[in-house]
Image: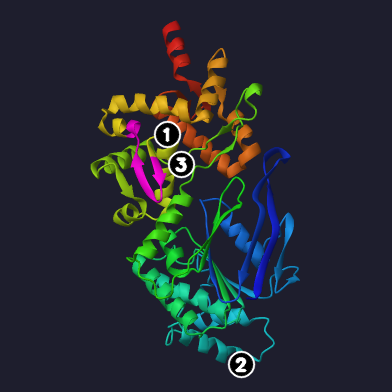
């Protein structure tokens, strides 16, 4: 088979605070071959969209190279078109004019461009809407316009960045099926597609191969073949088995190098906590206990209408705290998880506090810093700056907010929004007594 895209040892760094750099992608290697649909999966913030933009030539890698048909290119990749999540249409242009934009630099006459655009509009099911403006269209129709603008360029590779995530379920399903039908019947010139998605079922339904990225920084952790013929039955055993396998892969624990530690502990690793509430986690644990203590993640996600981006952080947090384990796509409560499900509100705080100190070294290190201070407090900025050195600004902010939220819930430490001070509950109690 012909290699249309080859990503060789690609890494990408972004500038962080105080002149520090943080790495988003590290040593990425992958190929996209003619005749296949490839899905890119990974945790939120793992760099999937960044990798897609590097393949498109919209972002330059810090290290490594990207080849199109065995040739290193500079600037925009000449063989790709891209469909974005946000439709990216010009509101003052009609459907026809928006699609024609894809041919702006094509060596064709104005009449030829119009004829080609009309042909594509008809193909994607928007015949009769050529003169309509985006505000007159539904979300699904607007995304079809974005798809038409990409396809009118007759690209070798169609890159799609979560193209269905902004649509309602039924509209998304219709668009997926229509796109696959065009692909299967050879009605579009595209020879390969790369799809960034947070939906495991979507990946198994559409793709021939799933590339799973880790994070902090992103690396290719798994390259899973999906050898199912279209059309695929979502209820078949092979389909659900592949979905379970990907759920199992995606729920593996993520760790980063310790950043709040004593010198003697420099090689320790700590686990970051997803930004979910204690209520979401305890509610999930209660539900699993009511269902017998063990569930299929794919089925529970389907029942609760939660996609991977919503379900994975809850599952990961529950596992980080030791309340459950994930095996072959199934989540099962541990003994401490069952205790949590049956506990009173006050007992739950004690259980979560004990598990936080045992399983989340980052919380233990922050508490250690606070207790080392005579007044038991430190500015938020102190911890944020340390986190930024390893995580980058946005992720550091999110991680610190999550830690503060769990610290408050467990009463390990507290936070004053006005003074931006994090302080230990013990220190506050001592000051109150002294007064």
Q: In terms of secondary structure, where does tag 1 sit?
A: loop
Counting residues from the N terminus, which is met first, the one under dot 3 or under dot 2?
2
Q: In terms of secondary structure, where does tag 2 sit?
A: helix
Left or right of 138 in this view: 361: right
The disc label shown at residue 275, or none? 3
- Mark 3 or 1, which is nearer the eye? 1
Label 2 CA crowd tier, 10 Å (few <14, some 14–19, many 20+): few
- Mark 3 or 2, which is nearer the eye? 3
Counting residues from the N terminus, which is met first, the one under dot 3 or under dot 1?
3
The disc label shown at residue 17, or none? none
At 51% from the left edge and 75% from the top edge, which residue is drawn?
Answer: 147
Q: How much space separates mark 3 and mark 1, taking CA atoms?
A: 14 Å
- Compared with 406, 172 (above or below) is below
**Can you identify the residue that label 2 sits on?**
112
Span of residues in magenta: 325-337
**Where does residue 288 sit, x and y in percent of width and height?**
29, 43
Label 1 CA crowd tier, 10 Å (few <14, some 14–19, many 20+): many
**Where does residue 199 sit, x and y in percent of width and height?**
44, 59
At 44% from the left edge and 45% from the top edge, which residue is drawn?
Answer: 313
Camera sees residue 98 = no
| Residue 326 in magenta stretch | yes
At 55% from the left edge and 86% from the top edge, which residue is drawn?
Answer: 117
Q: In terms of secondary structure, where does tag 3 sit?
A: loop
* Callouts 3 and 1 close, C-beta under 8 Å: no
Q: How much space separates mark 3 and mark 2, taking CA atoms?
A: 51 Å
**Can you identify the residue that label 1 sits on?**
321
The answer to which of 100 and 356 lies nearer the viewer is: 356
| Residue 24 in magenta stretch | no
């Amino acid at each position: 088979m012909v290699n249309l895209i080859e990503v060789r040892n690609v890494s990408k760094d972004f500038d962080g605070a105080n002149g520090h750099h943080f790495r988003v992608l590290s040593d990425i290697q992958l190929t996209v071959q003619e005749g296949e649909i490839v899905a890119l999966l990974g945790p939120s913030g793992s760099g999937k969209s960044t990798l897609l933009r590097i393949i498109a030539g919209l972002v330059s890698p810090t290290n490594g190279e990207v080849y199109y048909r065995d040739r290193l290119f500079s600037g925009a990749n000449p063989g790709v078109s891209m469909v974005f999540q946000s439709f990216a249409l010009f509101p003052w242009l009609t459907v026809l004019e928006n699609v024609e934009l894809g041919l702006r630099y094509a060596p064709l006459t104005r009449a030829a461009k119009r004829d080609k655009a009309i042909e594509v509009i008809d193909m994607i099911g928007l015949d009769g809407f050529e003169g309509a403006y985006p505000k007159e269209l539904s979300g699904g129709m607007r995304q079809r316009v974005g798809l038409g603008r990409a396809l009118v360029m007759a690209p070798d590779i169609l890159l799609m960045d979560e193209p269905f995530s902004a649509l309602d379920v039924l509209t998304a399903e219709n668009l997926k099926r229509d796109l696959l039908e065009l692909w299967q019947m050879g009605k579009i010139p595209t020879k390969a597609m790369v799809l960034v998605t947070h939906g495991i079922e979507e990946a198994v339904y559409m793709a021939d191969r799933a590339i799973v990225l880790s994070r902090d920084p992103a690396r290719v952790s798994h390259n899973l073949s999906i050898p199912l013929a279209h059309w695929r039955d979502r209820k078949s055993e092979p389909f659900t088995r592949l979905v379970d396998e990907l759920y199992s892969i995606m729920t593996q624990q993520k760790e980063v190098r310790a950043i709040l530690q004593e010198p003697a502990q420099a090689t320790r690793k700590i686990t970051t906590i997803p930004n979910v509430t204690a209520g979401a986690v305890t509610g999930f644990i209660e539900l699993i206990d009511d269902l017998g203590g063990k569930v299929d993640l794919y089925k529970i996600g389907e029942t609760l209408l939660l996609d991977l981006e919503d379900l994975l952080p809850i599952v990961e947090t529950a596992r980080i705290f030791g309340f459950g384990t994930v095996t072959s796509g199934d989540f099962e409560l541990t003994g401490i998880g069952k205790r949590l499900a049956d506990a009173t509100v006050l007992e739950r705080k004690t259980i979560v506090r004990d598990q936080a100190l045992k399983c989340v070294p980052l919380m233990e290190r922050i508490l250690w810093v606070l207790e080392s201070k005579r007044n038991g407090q430190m500015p938020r900025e102190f911890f944020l700056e340390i986190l930024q050195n390893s995580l980058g600004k946005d992720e550091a902010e999110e991680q610190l907010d999550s830690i503060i939220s769990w610290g408050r819930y467990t009463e390990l430490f507290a936070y004053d929004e006005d003074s931006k001070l994090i302080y230990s509950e013990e220190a506050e109690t001592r000051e109150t007594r002294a007064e």
